[in-house]
Image (cartoon, grey):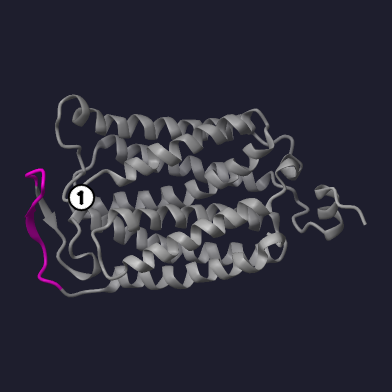
Amino acid sequence: MRKYKRPINILVLCVIALAFFACAFGLFSSGGSGQYDFKSINNEIVKIYGEGIYKNDSVSGVAQAKASDFVTLTIGIPLLMASLYFANKGSFRGELMLTGTLGYFLYTYMSYTFLLTYNPLFIVYVTIMSACLYAFILCFMSFEIETMPEMFNAKMPIKFLGGFQIAVGLALCLMWFGRIAPSIFLGSIPAGLENYTTLVIQGMDLGIVMPAAFLSGILIIKRKPIGYLLSSAIIIKGVTMLTCISAMIVNMALKGVDMSLVEILVFPMLNLLAIICLILLLKNTSKDENISNTELNRRMGIHA
């Protein structure tokens, strides 16, 4: 992070402030006529929430958004603040946590930008998404890729961590293609489309998360330097994102939203495995977290 410390700090602090505002507004805004039925473009009757900032979104969509706001406010923002603090102290683990947590915020506010029905916070979502994207890129660029294997214990369970990521990619592939396939071959409406126009989350997962999970899993099993960094980002992002999804499942159940048994069982199980992987990852990072300038220069090939 030393290379891009100032811009990363500015971007992350912007994310923290704006995300706090967006989450608080999403959770506590009120006003509106209440729930009502809406006939979608696909002639599907959808229950619209009708209150607060999410008044034009479906009951199912709002249950997910509010659960996401709660997790982001109580876990995501504190984790982002803590990881930024330790990263500024020169902690390697802090830098890893910062990169992975930014991945969570990027995914979350990308989905808010493209999925939620337009509301007055749209430009806030766009700003958070943009700040997260460039902060994530700068964090990624700040690591010396070729030295990454040196920062981890040689006995770290590489195959377990890589296998978990491949399993996540496979689970997403099977679940989402299972939902999409009937609409392709039978011409039916995809489950969960409701009043929205396309499957944004499924598109992001199949186009970004699934390939990244497969790639990072394979690369770390082969002990490629980039695999260590990709896997760290995927696992850390996975813990926060899967915790968020688990909260969504609970909130949707409380709201009486229909869900498939596969989704109810698979996501919490993946969440538990992701936490185990994160513990193993952090346990096996270099104990000498605070890299001295001399050591940093040595690894970068810079000589006095």
| Magenta highlight: main SS | loop
Question: How far across and how far down the image is residue 50, in percent?
Answer: 14, 65
Depicted 230 relative to depicted 252: above or below:
above
User: Does residue 73 show up?
Assistant: yes
Q: Quadrant of the N terminus?
A: bottom right
Judging depth in this view, the residue of 210 and 274 nearest the camera is: 210
Quick check: 205 left or right of 136?
left
Quick check: 199 left or right of 163?
left
Depicted 268 relative to depicted 135: above or below:
above
> Residue at the location (32% across, 72% down)?
25
> Residue at the location (25% across, 62% down)?
118
Specify the amino acid type for callout 1.
Answer: Tyr
Depicted 202 relative to depicted 183: above or below:
below
- Does the magenta segment cover residue 34? yes
| Residue at the right extreme of this rendering | 304
Q: Quadrant of the C terminus?
A: bottom right
Quick check: 43 left or right of 191?
left
Q: Quadrant of residue 187?
A: top left
Question: How far across and how far down the image is residue 286, in percent?
Answer: 74, 48
The residue carrying mark 1 is: 196
- Does the magenta segment cover residue 135? no
Judging depth in this view, the residue of 110 and 171 nearest the camera is: 110
Q: How many marks?
A: 1
User: Does residue 152 show up?
Assistant: no
Callout 1 secondary element: loop
Quick check: 269 left or right of 155?
left
> Residue at the location (56% across, 33% down)?
217
Judging depth in this view, the residue of 252 and 119 nearest the camera is: 119
Query: Which range is magenta?
Result: 32-44
| Residue at the top extreme of this rendering | 185
